[in-house]
Image (tube, coloured by chain):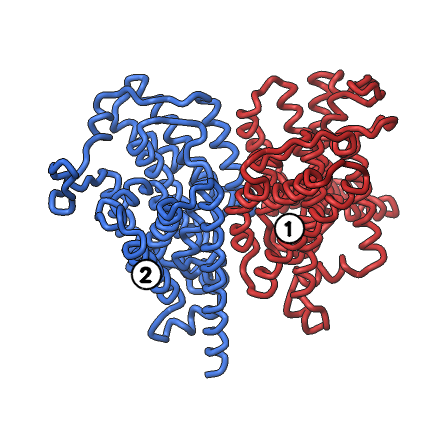
């Protein structure tokens, strides 16, 4: 009896994390069978002479950083507003452009100017987030429609900020943001993801933001009657997403050392929404788990890198990705789940019946 | 959307009001362009060119309007269009028959629609995710078929592509004294026919009213005895079919297949529908509005180009600004009406 209860408690605790965990487990097992050397990690020396970690696994964890950061913010927006922001890629391009613009305007690039540039990029991204948030929260426009505006013109605004060019930044500090800090073998973006995750964890621990967001997402009018201000919560979720966007944009700039408004985080909005969905969060709002979205981001990146390792060309990856996505969501769909539960219940009752007969 | 039922008793429904505003703004904008920019805007050929260039967008937006009225979303339409173009081009270059190519186009569209709706309706997966996967799949398949641009070398098709309706009295006299007639592509006729057919479908048939019902309130529709699943099935199927047609029209316009064809078309189509007064929440919308929404978007782009803002970023920035204006307008108009209704 106690064993049964413990088992039940275990599965209930996992809850919505089951799907992303199963997905990542399947991918890992598939890779183990295909080619065990996929997981080999070695220490290499890069151009600057630092000893750094290298290997497919590191590529996955490193490459998914922007996606994971955006997925954290997107989860909040999804939970509070019941819709998704499709302008994150465009907004990241704007943030990256501001970042580069500020760096270029100074005489020399040192730690102070980088921090200043990042803060300014943050503020600009938060303003655009607030613009989206105002449309959604005050004017009651569906998030997808409201953010369609910035999706349409965001990359052009970034182009305009750059003055029609793709300026490069040559600085060790900026390179370190997208690559490795001298003396640290772990890629910097991974460290940033961990820091962001801890910030979110602390935010939820010391404030009631998680509860407030969930109640606004489940029923806005009920939340209002309970003294919660849904407009503010929705606006806040978009502003927090703005911070995430600027961090992701700056990492993207750091990786390449230049800002290209067309290709920076291209198509990332769709992947981000996908990460949120694979994480088991309801895209209609309500309860959410940020951890699920983060795992979802790593699932997507593992899938992409696995396909690359199987010599699928980068343009064709999308087709295979689509098949895997459909398989994942079919497994996680409520109807299939219900059928499966019924099947299991039927088996359990049969077993019980046969046991009773035997006794 | 609880308000649709009550508002319908008033002389103007939400959809009609929003559509009227769109049409008025389109006409006003075009008149202003004629007065201040003159030149090309004075010729009827300008309007015809706008139609010629946008046939596939109009057809796709019609399909999307139906899905959006039914409370769903389909973001795979642009990618399906691109896939249809590429597969038809390759088929025709392999010495295929035009009629089979048309059937191929329709078949691909229908297949995508059917798979989407099976997953959405019967497995209850969110439409956004399903059609997103459909979009990825169609884009990936397009590049698997061919990464390089392909040109059609098919005689029968070349004749079809170059067939244009020439109207003398809409034409103009060129500088050298020759009369240049207005040229309308065959695709325009098909697109306008589809707009009219969809209008009739939405307005006068049982199925069309069903779309509004399931989009307005699924639960009430179910209680009224509407087969919600079958109605939703039909909405996505029609949307898929129209994506297929749009692909063929796209090929008739460009005569070539390219992996980046119709990039971003899904968002343009959604924007057209919204400008035309369709709400993403479902239950409100009109296909005539969608048609004018497409024309409005195109006119903005033409005005930006001809008013000398040559930097590449102005087109999208003005489009975004315009979109913002329409979306805010809709929100304000609808909330004012909702308030008025509460008072009476």
Front of the two marks 2 and 1? 2
What residue is pinned by disc 1? A282
User: Could you tell me which secondary element the residue under label 2 belongs to?
Assistant: helix
Rendered hue of chain A is red
User: Does the rendering let one see residue A228?
Assistant: yes
A200 sits left or right of A124 in the view: right
Residue occupying image coordinates x 37% and y 69%: B13
Element at badge 1?
A: loop
Is B200 placed above or below B52 here? below
The percent position of residue A216, horizontal first and vertical second, equals 68, 63
Residue density around tag 1, few if under 14, some if 14–19, many if 20 or more, within 10 Å: many
Mark 2–mark 1 Cα distance, whole angstroms, equals 43 Å
Quarter of image, res A259: top right
- Local crowd size for mark 2, using a 10 Å CA cut-off: few (<14), some (14–19), many (≥20): few
- Which disc, if any, is residue A130? none
Q: Chain of mark 2?
A: B
Q: Is residue A29 above or below residue B109?
A: above
Q: Quadrant of the C terminus of chain A?
A: top right
Query: Which quadrant would residue B142 be assigned to in this image?
Result: top left
Chain containing the residue with disc 1 = A
Q: Which x, y percent locates residue A329? A: 60, 40
Q: Picture coordinates of residue A184 (x, y %)?
A: 86, 28
Q: Nearer the viewer, residue A285 or B25?
A: B25
Residue A114 in the image: above or below residue B219: above
- Tally of numbered discs: 2
CB contact under 8 Å: marks 2 and 1: no
Residue at 48% of width from left, 31% of height from top? B139
Q: Is residue A118 above or below residue A173?
A: below
- Check disc 2 and report the residue beneath it: B28
- Is residue A350 in view from this perspective? no
């Amino acid at each position: 009896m106690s064993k049964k209860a413990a088992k039940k408690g275990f599965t209930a605790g996992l809850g919505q994390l089951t799907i992303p965990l199963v997905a990542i487990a399947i991918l890992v097992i598939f890779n183990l069978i295909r080619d065990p050397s996929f997981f080999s990690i070695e220490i290499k020396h890069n151009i600057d002479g630092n000893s750094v970690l290298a290997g497919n696994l590191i590529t996955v964890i490193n490459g998914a950083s922007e996606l994971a950061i955006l997925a954290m913010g997107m989860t909040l927006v999804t939970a509070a507003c019941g819709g998704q922001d499709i302008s994150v890629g465009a907004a990241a391009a704007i943030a990256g452009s501001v970042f580069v613009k500020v760096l270029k305007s100074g005489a020399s690039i040192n730690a102070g100017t980088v921090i200043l540039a990042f803060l300014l990029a943050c503020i600009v991204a938060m303003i655009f987030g607030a613009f989206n948030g105002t449309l959604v929260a005050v004017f009651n426009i569906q998030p997808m429609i409201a953010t369609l505006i910035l999706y349409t013109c965001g990359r052009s605004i970034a182009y305009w900020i750059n003055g029609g060019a793709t300026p490069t930044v040559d600085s060790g500090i900026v390179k370190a943001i997208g690559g490795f800090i001298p003396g640290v073998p772990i890629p910097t973006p991974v460290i940033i993801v961990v820091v962001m995750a801890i910030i979110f964890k602390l935010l939820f621990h010391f404030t009631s933001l998680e509860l407030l967001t969930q109640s606004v997402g489940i029923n806005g009018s009920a939340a209002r009657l309970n003294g919660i201000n849904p407009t503010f919560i929705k606006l806040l979720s978009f502003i927090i997403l703005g911070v995430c966007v600027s961090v992701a944009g700056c990492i993207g700039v750091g990786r390449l050392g230049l800002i290209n408004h067309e290709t920076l985080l291209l198509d990332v909005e769709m992947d981000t929404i996908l990460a949120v969905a694979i994480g088991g969060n309801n895209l209609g709002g309500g309860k959410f788990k940020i951890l699920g979205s983060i795992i979802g981001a790593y699932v997507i990146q593992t899938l992409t890198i696995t396909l690359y390792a199987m010599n699928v060309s980068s343009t064709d990856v999308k087709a295979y990705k689509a098949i895997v996505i459909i398989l994942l969501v079919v497994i996680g769909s409520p109807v299939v789940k219900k059928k499966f539960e019924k099947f299991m219940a039927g088996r359990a009752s049969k077993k019980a019946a046969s046991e009773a007969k035997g006794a | 959307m609880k308000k649709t039922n009550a508002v319908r008793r008033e002389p103007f429904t939400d959809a009609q009001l929003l559509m009227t505003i769109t049409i008025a703004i389109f006409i006003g904008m075009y008149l202003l362009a004629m007065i201040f920019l003159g030149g090309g805007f004075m010729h009827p050929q300008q309007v015809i060119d706008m139609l010629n260039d946008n046939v596939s967008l109009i057809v796709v937006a019609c399909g999307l309007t139906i899905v959006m009225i039914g409370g769903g979303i389909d973001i795979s339409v642009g990618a399906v269009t691109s896939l249809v173009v590429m597969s038809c081009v390759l088929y025709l270059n392999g010495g295929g028959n035009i009629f089979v190519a048309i059937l191929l186009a329709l078949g691909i569209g229908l297949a995508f629609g059917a798979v989407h709706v099976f997953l959405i309706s019967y497995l209850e997966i969110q439409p956004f995710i399903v059609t997103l996967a459909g979009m990825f799949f169609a884009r990936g398949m397009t590049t698997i078929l061919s990464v390089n641009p392909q040109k059609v070398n098919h005689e029968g098709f070349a004749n079809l592509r170059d067939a244009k309706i020439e109207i003398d009295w809409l034409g103009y006299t060129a500088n050298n004294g020759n009369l240049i007639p207005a040229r309308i592509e065959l695709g325009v006729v098909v697109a306008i026919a589809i707009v009219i057919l969809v209008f009739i479908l939405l307005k006068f048939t049982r199925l069309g009213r069903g779309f509004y019902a399931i989009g307005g309130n699924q639960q009430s529709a179910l209680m009224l005895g509407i087969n919600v699943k079958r109605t939703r099935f039909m909405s996505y199927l029609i949307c898929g079919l129209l994506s297929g047609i749009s692909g063929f029209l796209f090929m008739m316009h460009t005569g070539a297949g390219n992996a980046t064809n119709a990039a971003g078309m899904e968002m343009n189509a959604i924007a057209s529908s919204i400008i035309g007064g369709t709400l993403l929440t479902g239950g409100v919308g009109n296909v005539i509005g969608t048609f004018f929404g497409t024309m409005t978007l195109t006119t903005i782009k033409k005005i930006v180009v001809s008013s000398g803002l040559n930097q590449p970023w102005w087109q999208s920035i003005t489009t975004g600004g315009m979109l913002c204006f329409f979306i805010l307008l809709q929100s304000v108009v609808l909330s004012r009406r909702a308030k008025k209704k509460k008072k009476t």
